Amino acid sequence: MSEKTKIIIVAAVLVALLAVTPFANSFVILLITQALIFAILAMSLDILLGFTGLPSLGQAAYLGVGAYLTAILATNYQFGLDGSFWVVIVLGMMLGAVTAAFFGLFAIRATGVYFLMITLALGQCVWGLAYRWNSLTGGDNGINMPGRPEFGIDLADDLTFFYVVFGFFVATLVVLHLLVKSPFGRSLVGIRESELRMRILGYNTWLHKYIAFIIAGGFGGLAGVLWAFLNGLVSPEDVILTTSVDALLMVVLGGPGTLVGATIGAGVVVFLREYLSTLVTWWQYVLGGVYVLTILYLPGGLMGIPERIRQRRTLSAAAERAKAVSASQ
Amino acid sequence: MLRKLITGRRRLFPLSAVALGISLASGPAVAAEELRIGFVAPMTGIFAQIGKDMSNGFQMYVDEVGGNFAGAKVTFILEDGQGKPPVNVRKAEKLVRQDKVHMFIGGLLASTGYALAPVSTRLKTVYISSIAAADDLTQREASKYPLVVRTGWTSSQPNHPFGAWACEQGYKKVVTVAADYAFGYETVGGFQKTFEDCGGKVIQKIWPPLGTKDFGPFIPTIKDSADAIFTLMVGPMSLQFPKQLAAAGIKKPVMGGGTSYDEFVLPSMGDEVVGHVSALQYSAALDTPKNKAFVKKYREKYGKVPSYYSESNYTTAQMIHEVMKKTGGKWPGAKKFVQLISEVQLDSVRGPVRLDDMRNPVHNIYIRKVEKKKMHGYDQEELWNTVIKTYPNVSQFWTYKKADFLKQPVYSRTFPPCKHCE
């Protein structure tokens, strides 16, 4: 499939989503919005995991700082509830990026499982702050948002908010797509494949990874701001390890290094977690089963399915040809 | 598949085989009023057992009346809140938006109560907090949540009389050991307030984190000069603390917040808790015909002694039924419902219950002592919370004037201040 066809398919699916959503019931609209927000988080992680080869287990930290910033500004200063919403978006991204810039100083020097452990520990630090800094974060109780912004358009309307989140999602997808196609993005892939070789070629691989880490943090912060407004509650539960693991699994499930895969993964996980759980009590087995099967049979994630089918076809075609050849002899 | 997702499949819990049987037997059901009740409780995770107790209590009452609240057919929809506030919010959203429930009930932790209350305001749906005891929901923040009704209790409510009781026992100095979160602060705060008002002194406050299993670092620091220990433990902590206290050879009298010795944990406890005293609005050992019947029936049905988690939700269902009786089975609308339920006066399993003007129950508080004995005609010796004193009709403000009480900040880690800490 050519690059162009792929883009057309993605665009068609997005347009379809845009067209179908208004007809869904209002709870499903909420879930679609949630899936898009987590897709932004998952894509930001995909930059690290899929393109740079850095398995970060602390992505919830950036979601957390973005969400807490939003909640604190909204409740203590009534800021971000009108046109200043856009300022909060920028601030949220900046705080995510700054946090990542700080954490990156510790994390980037490590690789593989050590990187995983350090990011996990740093993520837990943010959780610890959220849980214990009572005066600022409300501790265990979290912070209730006073409402969603209104500036000409009223985001309290779920469909309107969906359109706004959709806009941010598409923007993120486009920006990150351009990023990974840029020379900078190609060098990230180079680092993933062989950091040593990149270093010998004269690339400052530390700086490349550091910048990728900061960008991922920034988009994580964006997801956090939107999440705070969607859920209406910012709680330490949002920042716990489970959220980071979820983000990681979304990427792995969808297919690392594809961006679109992260989005599909986010959709699947959110709907299994939030929708299936309202239907059956054993939804956790389904979620677990999906993870296990994906890792066993689809190392490339759900995005790897077309490739698998093609492989199988070529293989069986080759086998048939071989049979035909042997039969004719 | 897509269509299914979009239109949304609903999981309706048929109330009981009985209810179903009746409706089947009577042929095509008459288009009666339907009362849709959503229920959020932890069904998975560490609080799953408590969640079961909660929903069982509610379900039992609904089953008793055959799923019929004065002509309204009750549809009970249970959702798993996993014991996490954000998940509870999502489930409540689902119940209101998709299932179009008339009200949602439940929430376990205080933090969950604080999370669910705004949802009720935002979605203009009644929320009945049957367990979550966060003080401010019906105190300083009550005006923000006009559609919130509490049928349970505030954390400090039973501990106000408990402090006065401690004075009567002649305790002068008390050390508190309580779980380090809002519920712990409010429980200790209520106790400290009244205990110090009648001349007692809290000389030390120890805050082990929620979920502590090893109290080794905390127990040795308990001051020797204390006459008694006041404790608040939650979940597995309740089991470990008395054991380790006994192992450390500390023989001081122990008082505890109600959940430390709930019927829910008693069967797993050993003799080390015998003699410990706690305060709550319910005890399964309450010697009234109503309660005896309730305990027997519950135990027969679910195989265990009901905890206050079950009782509270059973009574909640009963109160809703009372409202529906008044309206003749018609849903009166959210605002009117809140008004009607505030007027309900009930002789419930726990004793007489009515709501105050901030929509929190006024009910008896029982001082309960853990004893090993036979009760309600069961032939085995078990641990029971024997009621040793009853404070009748206790409101969330105890004997204080409402306005004065609301002027002070909500009980916290630093309020009331520890003036007598040595």
Image (tube, coloured by chain):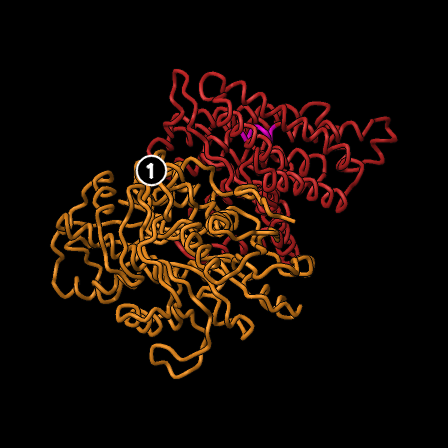
Chain colours: A red, B orange
- Residue A18 is left or right of residue A304, and the answer is left
Q: Is residue A223 magenta?
A: yes
Q: Is residue A147 magenta?
A: no
In the rendered image of this protein, does residue A271 appear above or below residue B267? above
Q: Position of residue B188 (x, y in %)?
A: 51, 51
Residue A185 visible in the picture: yes
Q: Position of residue B194 (x, y in %)?
A: 46, 50
Residue under the image location 57 percent in, 55 percent down: B176
Residue under the image location 44 percent in, 50 percent down: B155
Q: Position of residue B204 (x, y in %)?
A: 61, 51
Residues B66 and B27: in front is: B66
Q: Position of residue B115 (x, y in %)?
A: 44, 41
- In this picture, which residue range is highlighted in magenta? A219-225
Q: Mark 1, residues whose alpha carbon is within 10 Å: few (<14), some, or many (≥20)?
A: some
Which image quarter: residue A197?
Answer: top right
In the picture as drawn, the residue positioned furthest to the bottom comes out as B379
Which image quarter: residue B144?
Answer: top left
Residue under the image location 42 percent in, 32 percent down: A17
What's under tag 1, amino acid-wise?
Answer: Asn
User: What residue did someone put label 1 on?
Assistant: A25
Residue A26 visible in the picture: no
SS type, badge 1: loop
Residue under the image location 73 percent in, 46 percent down: A117
Residues A162 and A96: in front is: A96
Residues B266 and B390: in front is: B390
